C-alpha cells in the first residue's frame, strides 16, 4: 500500500518558497489563547498565478499523549488571477489548549505538490 505521508516535502523555508512558515509562540501559559499564522513564501515569494499557485493550507495540532492530530483550520485559496483577483498565501487561526504538543502546517502547490512544517508548543502552568 502506498502512503500519502511519503509525498509531503519539507525544507529550509529561508531557501524554499513552498515550505509553510509557522508563526506561533513556543511557550504559552495554561488557558492562554494561541494565535498561529502560516505563510507560504515568506523569504522567497511564491507565485500566485492561474498557472502556479498555492491551492490550500491546513493547520493541525497533536497534543502530547494523543494518537491523532486535530485539524484546527483549513483555508482554500480560490482567486489566482481570475478577473484580476489574487489571494495571498497566508492564514491565521486562534485556539486554546491545555496540553503541550505539535503544530503542523501543510500546503499544496498545484505544480510542486504537498509541503509540510511543524513547531512544538509548550503549555506551562
Image (cartoon, grey):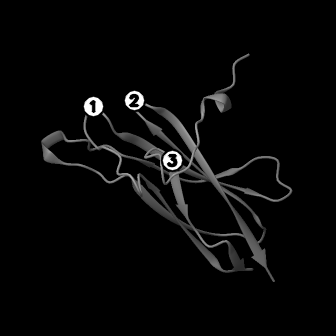
- Which of the two discs, 1 and 2, labels the residue nearer the N terminus? 1
According to the picture, the residue beneath numbered tag 2 turns out to be 111
Crowdedness near tag 2: few (<14), some (14–19) or many (≥20) residues, C-alpha within 10 Å: few
Q: Where in the figure is residue 9, as x and y percent of width and height?
A: 58, 37
Residue 27 versus residue 76: which sits nearer the camera? Answer: 27
Q: Quadrant of residue 52?
A: top left
- Which of the two discs, 1 and 3, labels the residue nearer the N terminus? 3
Task: Decide: is 5 above or below 45.
Answer: above
Secondary structure, mark 3, is: loop
The span from disc 2 to disc 3 (Cα, nearest Å) is: 14 Å
Q: Where in the figure is residue 62, as x and y percent of width and height?
A: 73, 55
Q: Quadrant of residue 4?
A: top right
The residue lying furthest to the right in this view is 65
According to the picture, the residue beneath numbered tag 1 turns out to be 51
117 on left or right of 28: left
Q: Where in the figure is residue 36, as x and y percent of width and height?
A: 55, 66
According to the picture, the residue beneath numbered tag 3 turns out to be 19
Q: Pointers 1 and 2 in contact (CB under 8 A)?
A: yes
Task: Decide: is 103 above or below 80.
Answer: below
Amino acid at each position: 500500500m502506498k502512503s500519502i505521508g511519503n509525498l509531503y516535502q519539507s525544507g529550509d523555508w529561508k531557501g524554499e518558497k513552498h515550505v509553510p512558515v509557522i508563526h506561533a509562540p513556543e511557550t504559552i501559559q495554561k488557558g492562554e489563547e494561541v494565535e498561529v499564522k502560516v505563510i507560504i513564501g515568506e523569504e522567497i515569494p511564491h507565485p500566485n498565478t492561474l498557472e502556479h499557485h498555492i491551492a490550500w493550507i491546513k493547520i493541525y495540532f497533536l497534543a502530547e499523549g494523543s494518537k491523532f492530530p486535530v485539524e484546527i483550520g483549513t483555508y482554500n485559496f480560490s482567486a489566482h488571477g481570475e478577473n484580476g483577483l489574487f489571494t495571498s498565501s497566508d492564514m491565521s487561526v486562534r485556539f486554546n489548549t491545555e496540553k503541550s504538543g505539535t503544530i503542523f502546517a501543510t500546503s499544496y502547490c498545484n505544480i510542486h505538490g504537498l509541503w509540510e512544517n511543524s513547531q512544538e508548543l509548550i503549555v506551562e502552568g
